[in-house]
């Protein structure tokens, strides 16, 4: 694993009895790059993210994360990883500030108050810090969850539909912020999204999954050209509807 590699996955498999959720997936991701995970429901995106977080153990294969064998020594690197999804709630009774403070403590963040104020300014959360998380709108919860994911300045950031529930203006601002964070920090980012315009804008490379198997991989514009389409959404629809073959 090179010094620049953030993630190396080799022959990763996940089976549930007779059902194969992910079959022999291999890829590498360098620090400072954004990798997109594309696929329909049940394609294996969430399963892949869960194994990269250590929430699921693979049935076979290996994962190297930030220079460590993740299956044997994940606790050495967990403090340098974080995750955001609008489908995973934070504790509802705690205020946004309390939630961020708890997670900052878990990640060993120094100068916690200053870090929370910084994120509140960046993500327009200032007026929400004293509000219970459970009383936020869907879009506000998305921004608060993203602040949680960035609290420790992760070297590996895992994102599942990061702009879901956001209006177009807020979503655009958030994408710009994420790209700026990735460029200035040198973090590696794995992005699972159904928003093809978002993937085209943010991702350097894309993995396309279908029924738990690798369908194709490449840069957005390369895939668009390869399949003779004008947009990545058209490529995705061809794959999802079985109109394209490798």
Image (cartoon, rainbow, N blue to C red):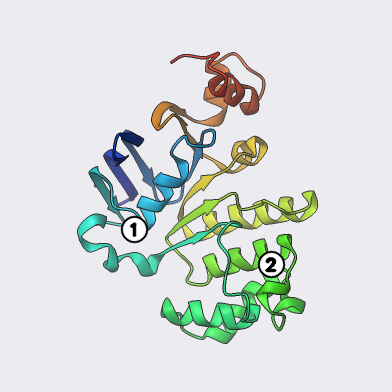
1 or 2: tag closer to the N-terminus:
1
Q: Quadrant of residue 47?
A: top left
Q: Is residue 135 left or right of residue 52?
A: right
User: Residue 215 placed where, x, y %?
Assistant: 43, 25
Count of numbered circles on the image: 2
Of marks 1 and 2, the one in the foreground: 1
- Residue position marked by numbered label 1 in the rendering: 54
Give the answer, above or below, for where 116 lies relative to 187: below
Q: CA gap, disc 1 to disc 2?
A: 28 Å
Outermost residue, front direction?
17
Q: Residue at x 71, y 84 (%)?
A: 130
Is 154 above or below relative to 183?
below
Residue 82 location, x and y as percent? 46, 63
Q: Which residue is mark 2?
A: 123
Give x and y (percent) for residue 60: 22, 42
- Determine the image quadrant of residue 54: bottom left
- Residue 154 quadrant: bottom left
- The answer to whether residue 202 is above or below residue 207 is below
Within 10 Å of disc 2 (Cα), the crowding (few <14, some 14-19, many 20+) is: some
Quick one: 80 or 137, which is closer to the camera?
Answer: 137
* Residue at the spot 67% in from the left edge and 37% down from the top edge: 197
In the rendered structure, find residue 178 and report the number of the disc placed on it: none
- Residue 63 visible? The answer is yes
Q: Position of residue 235 (x, y in %)?
A: 59, 22
Side of 126 relative to 18 (left or right): right
Say whether residue 2 is visible: no
Residue name at image x 58 percent, y 65 percent:
89
Query: Helix, strand, or loop for circle 1?
Result: loop
Please name the residue shown 52% across and 33% down the image.
39
- Front residue of 19/50: it is 19
């Amino acid at each position: 694993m090179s010094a620049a590699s953030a993630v190396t996955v080799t022959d990763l498999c996940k089976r549930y009895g007779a059902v194969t959720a992910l079959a022999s997936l291999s890829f590498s991701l360098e620090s400072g790059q954004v990798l997109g995970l594309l696929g329909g429901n049940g394609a294996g995106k969430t399963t892949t993210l869960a194994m990269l977080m250590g929430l699921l153990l693979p049935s076979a294969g290996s994962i190297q994360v930030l220079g460590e064998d993740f299956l044997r020594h994940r606790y050495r690197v967990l403090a340098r990883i974080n995750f955001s999804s609008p489908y995973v709630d934070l504790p509802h009774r705690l205020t946004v500030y309390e939630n961020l403070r708890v997670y900052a403590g878990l990640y060993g963040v120094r100068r916690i108050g200053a870090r929370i104020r910084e994120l509140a300014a960046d993500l327009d959360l200032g007026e929400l810090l004293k509000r219970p998380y459970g009383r936020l709108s869907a879009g506000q919860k998305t921004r608060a969850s993203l602040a949680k994911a960035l609290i420790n300045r992760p070297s590996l950031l895992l994102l599942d539909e990061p702009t879901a529930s956001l209006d177009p203006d807020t979503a655009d601002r958030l994408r710009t912020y994420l790209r700026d964070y990735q460029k200035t920090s040198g973090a590696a980012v794995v992005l699972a999204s159904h928003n093809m315009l978002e993937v085209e804008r943010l991702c350097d490379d894309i993995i396309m999954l279908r029924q738990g198997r690798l369908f194709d991989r490449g840069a957005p514009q390369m895939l668009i050209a390869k399949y003779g389409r004008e947009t990545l959404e058209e490529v995705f629809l061809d794959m999802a509807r079985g109109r394209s073959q490798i």
